[in-house]
Amino acid sequence: MRTQPAPAIILVRPQLGENIGAAARAMLNFGLTDLRLVAPRDGWPNPAAGPSASGADSVLKAARVYDTLADAAYDCALVLATTVRRRELTKPVMTPEAGMAAIQATAGQAAIVFGPERAGLESEDVALARAILTIPVNPDFGSLNLAQAVLVCAYEWSRGGTQVSTPQERNDPPAPQADLEGMIGQITDMLTARHYFFPEARATAMHRSLRGLLTQPGWSAQQVRTLRGVLTTLAKKPR
């Protein structure tokens, strides 16, 4: 019996309603129902999604819309970004099978993130994730459409075994994305006030590197609270 909650599927800036519907169909084929949309290009609801969903209307009706990926993943303890390996980002890289095993081993909600049909996820989107999930396709023809990519991950999820919680997972759960974003924001604000992100030409790369460091898998909720307490203390003026 599976005890781990099913992962959310997050589509970032999806372009075509037909692809959203096909992704919903792929999800429901394997029991996934939590669909989250980030800034869909043509708005939501989209009448083009229904026919391609082929009966997965319940997934479409329950879909939630967010302005940003951080908002969509607010409650997630593990976020996996589906993309090819990015040289500019230092992230663990997993196959779908390994990614689903990581979800099974993580207490709390998880999410699998997919990018726009034309260009995929941007570096800033991938930087928010804890790890990269790459589907090992033919290197000479790596063209997967959105629904196909969702289908592969949903299938791998359906193959997973029962999650067995360890005492550490029960007593010290992973930090949800919202808490992690709060910590990153706090550190960023403190560093900005001290002109850390300089020169300006390097600021974007420095922000990305910092986020990459702080989104490495393994932060627990208690660790995030502890570090934020330390930062709050350091921000106070000495007595």
Image: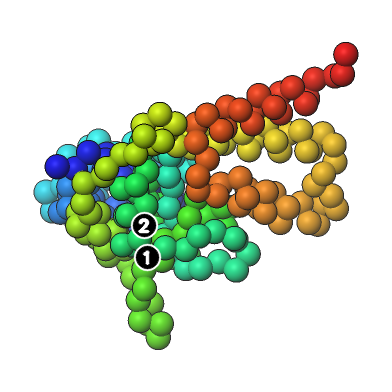
Q: Quadrant of the C terminus?
A: top right
Taking 159 as reference, is 197 above or below it?
Answer: above
Q: Quadrant of the N terminus?
A: top left
Q: Position of residue 28 (x, y in %)?
A: 17, 49
Is residue 21 left or right of 177 when viewed as pictured?
left
Q: In the displayed orientation, state which residue is furthest to the right.
A: 239
Q: Which mark is residue 95?
A: 1
Is residue 122 left or right of 189 when viewed as pictured?
left
Q: Secondary structure at mark 1?
A: loop
How many C-alpha atoms fall within 10 Å of the one at disc 1: few (<14), some, or many (≥20)? some
Q: Which residue is mark 2?
A: 99
Q: Please name the amino acid that badge 2 sits on.
A: Gly
Q: Position of residue 203 (x, y in %)?
A: 76, 51
* Gap between marks 2 and 1 measured at Cα: 6 Å
Residue at the image point whose x is 22% and y is 54% from the top: 160
Q: Secondary structure at mark 2?
A: helix
Is residue 203 left or right of 16 when viewed as pictured?
right
The answer to whether mark 2 and mark 1 are in CB contact below 8 A is yes
48 or 166, which lies in front? Answer: 166
150 or 166, which lies in front? Answer: 166
